[in-house]
Image (spheres, helix red, strand yellow):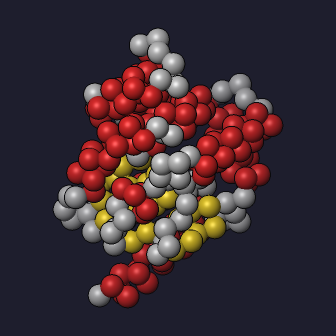
Amino acid sequence: MIIAIDGPAASGKGTLARLIAEHLGYACLDTGLLYRAVARDVLARGQSLEDEEFAAQAARMIDTATLDDPELRSPGAGDAASVVAKFPAVRQALLALQRAFADQSPGAVLDGRDIGTVVCPDADIKIFVTADLAVRAQRRFEELRRRGDPVTLEAVTEILRLRDERDQSRADAPMRAASDADLLDTTEMDIEAAFDAAVGLIKRRIARLG
């Protein structure tokens, strides 16, 4: 079974994907880490994030063993990822890797921005997680502050706004809800409530499938 979880940054989709995978005993992949790793590798080689050819080469050479690099969780890494993610050649280079991950038994949970629309359009279950920008910015700000990162709420809000704009407007695989996805607005939910709601959506979808 393949579960696709999409949505904007700080909507809670990554945490939900991990909790759902643990609950079901499935493998889990945060596909955003792939793009963050590509951006990291491009910058590490002194190249511009706007160099599509070099970014695509970095994507083809990605080492998935480095996805636990803590630097990939930094706010700058997320912003850099949204730059290289706009390139069709980068997305194409990572597509086979993501699909291979999804095709495992007993199942896999993948979260990102185009899982239900492009990576796994035939996923058994699709959930699009969203929340108001102000709420998402507050969540990310508090997360970064707990880590000791010197950020302001205003700066985090602007970073998320620009990421949303890039993700939604890119020509290749823009962020949007699949037509057959269940929508989950977590604006007024804590993670426990969001998890319960997501599990409820999954159970109802499985019941309809079977």
Residue 201 visible in rendering:
yes
- The residue under the point 55% across, 30% down is 80
Q: Is residue 79 left or right of residue 38?
A: right
Residue lying furthest top = 46
In x, y percent, where is residue 152? 77, 32
- The residue under the point 34% across, 53% down is 28
- The residue under the point 53% across, 53% down is 174
In x, y percent, where is residue 156? 72, 37
Residue 19 visible in rendering:
no
Q: Is residue 11 left or right of residue 14?
A: right
* Residue nearest the viewer, comparing 131 with 142: 131
* Residue nearest the viewer, comparing 193 with 105: 105
In x, y percent, where is residue 77? 54, 30
Check the picture and name the quadrant holding the C terminus.
bottom left
Check the picture and name the quadrant holding the N terminus.
bottom left
- The residue under the point 46% across, 37% down is 87
- Residue 74, picture quadrant: top right
